[in-house]
Structure formats: structure tokens, C-alpha cells
Image (cartoon, helix red, strand yellow):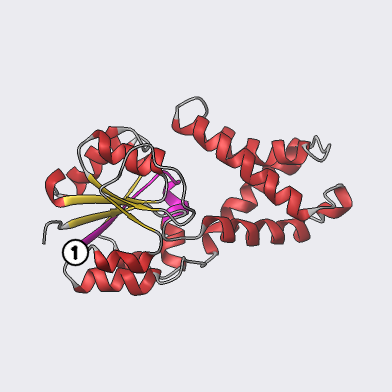
């Protein structure tokens, strides 16, 4: 085998963040009676949340904001879109969201089958994720895939964030792996693929949505089942 260590991203690659976040926000919308507070269009609320979340995560990755600000502002800004300036409500939503989200279990199609296939073939599977430590471990446990991974590298444990090269170097050290025997698999070209490229690690762009690629990655797949053609 050319590769021995396979480093996966979690959110949007194996664990369906958008579907799980939507289900969690729907529950919060009902539990906190947001319709009575002015959030009459849940679909718009969800759409705006995703937009704010993406922008804030980009700022977080670039070191402009801290975790606490990310957690609060994604709710605060979404509520402001509905003329609700209630910081206490935003904080409550942020806290409840982080408690509830990791209990969701929606994975992308064939996730467990493919992870089992790769394990049976003798690959060492690991994770490199920008998610929060407690949250990511809870997602893995509740969705039933924690046992597949030897090392789980988070931005908190490594004190760095993808696409920074430091988190990849830290992951290689923790796994006892070399660059030549390792490959990164993730959905985000700018975060997972560019990050791996920066240290000379091969990459698989898990491109479910046919997003643009500025440079050709080592491999591209549009479904997890296609990993069987590579490994």
C-alpha cells in the first residue's frame, strides 16, 4: 500500500453538519418559542445562520476571533436579522446548540461501510478537525464511528487550525506517521486540501457539491464509495 495513515476531516466530510445543524436549530426554534419572538420563517433563519456561521468560522480560522465570540455571534447576528437584539437569548441558544448538536447522528451515505472497508484493508484512520474538542468527540461517540479512529486531532488539542501547517505536523507526530505514507481526506479545498498541500501531503478532495478547485488535488471523489477505487 502506498499509504498507511488516512487523515479524515469530520464535519461536511463524514458527519453531515448541515443536516444535523438544521435538525438542532429546528428543535431550538420550537423549544425557545422563537416564532413568538419574531422568527416567523424558519427556513430563512436557518439560511442566515449558515451564512453567519461560515463567515465567523473563517474569521476564527484566521485568528481574528475566539471560540466564545464565534459561539455567541453566530446566534446573535442571526437573531438581529429578525430585529431581535437579545444577547441573553443568543447566549442561551449558543449554549443549547453546542449541547444538542453533538447528539445528532446523521452521517453521509456509506460512511460506516467505507470506514469499515478501510479498516479491514489495514489502514490507520485518524481525524484532523477544526471543531471543538468536547463537541467533536461527542459527535464521534453518538454517531457510532469513534472506534474507527486511532488519533483525533482537534484545533484545541493542537493549538492550531487547518489550513495552518502546524496542525498537520502535530497530527503526523501524534500518529507516528511520515508525510509520504499519509493522505488527507476532506471536503474543503481551502482548508483541508490547501493545508495538506502546504506540507507536501497527498490529498483526496471529497467534493460532494462539485466546488471549484484552484489546483488539482491528488484525487477527487464525489461520493465516499469512490474511495474504494483509490484505496
Measuring from the top left, give residue 13's x and y in whole percent: 42, 56
Q: Residue at x 69, y 51 (%)?
A: 46
Most foreground residue, 72 or 172: 172
Q: Position of residue 76 (x, y in %)?
A: 70, 37
Q: Residue at x 27, y 68 (%)?
A: 228
Left or right: residue 44 compared with residue 97: right
Q: Is residue 11 left or right of residue 74?
A: left
> In the rendered view, would you say 135 is above or below 73?
below
The boundaries of the magenta stretch are: 123-136
> Is residue 124 shown in magenta?
yes
Residue labelled with disc 1: 123
* Mark 1 Cα shell of 10 Å, populated few (<14), some (14-19), many (≥20): some
Q: Quadrant of the C terminus?
A: bottom left
> Relative to residue 78, is residue 64 drawn left or right?
left
Reply yes or no: does residue 176 show up in magenta.
no
Q: Quadrant of the N terminus?
A: bottom left
Q: Is residue 104 left or right of residue 174?
A: right
Q: Where's residue 82, x and y in %? A: 82, 41
Residues 128 and 92: in front is: 128
Q: Image height check: is 144 above or below 33?
A: below
Q: Residue at x 31, y 43 (%)?
A: 216
Question: Is residue 4 shown to the viewer in this render?
Answer: yes
Q: Is residue 178 visible?
A: no
Q: Secondary structure at mark 1?
A: loop
Question: In the image, is residue 16 above or below residue 181?
Answer: below
Amino acid at each position: 500500500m502506498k499509504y498507511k495513515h488516512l487523515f479524515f476531516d469530520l464535519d461536511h466530510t463524514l458527519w453531515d453538519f448541515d443536516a444535523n445543524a438544521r435538525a438542532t436549530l429546528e428543535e431550538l426554534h420550537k423549544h425557545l418559542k422563537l416564532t413568538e419572538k419574531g422568527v416567523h420563517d424558519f427556513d430563512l433563519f436557518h439560511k442566515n445562520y449558515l451564512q453567519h456561521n461560515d463567515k465567523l468560522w473563517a474569521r476564527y480560522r484566521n485568528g481574528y476571533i475566539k471560540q466564545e465570540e464565534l459561539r455567541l455571534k453566530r446566534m446573535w447576528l442571526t437573531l438581529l436579522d429578525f430585529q431581535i437584539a437579545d444577547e441573553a437569548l443568543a447566549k442561551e441558544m449558543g449554549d443549547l446548540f453546542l449541547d444538542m448538536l453533538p447528539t445528532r447522528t446523521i452521517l453521509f451515505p456509506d460512511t460506516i461501510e467505507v470506514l469499515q472497508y478501510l479498516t479491514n484493508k489495514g489502514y490507520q484512520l485518524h481525524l484532523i478537525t477544526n471543531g471543538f474538542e468536547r463537541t467533536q468527540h461527542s459527535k464521534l461517540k453518538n454517531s457510532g464511528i469513534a472506534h474507527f479512529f486511532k488519533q483525533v486531532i482537534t484545533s484545541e488539542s493542537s493549538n492550531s487550525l487547518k489550513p495552518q501547517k502546524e496542525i498537520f505536523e502535530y497530527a503526523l507526530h501524534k500518529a507516528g506517521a511520515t508525510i509520504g505514507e499519509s493522505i488527507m481526506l476532506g471536503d474543503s479545498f481551502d482548508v483541508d486540501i490547501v493545508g495538506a498541500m502546504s506540507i507536501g501531503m497527498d490529498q483526496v478532495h471529497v467534493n460532494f457539491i462539485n466546488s471549484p478547485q484552484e489546483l488539482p488535488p491528488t484525487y477527487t471523489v464525489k461520493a465516499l464509495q469512490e474511495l474504494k477505487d483509490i484505496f
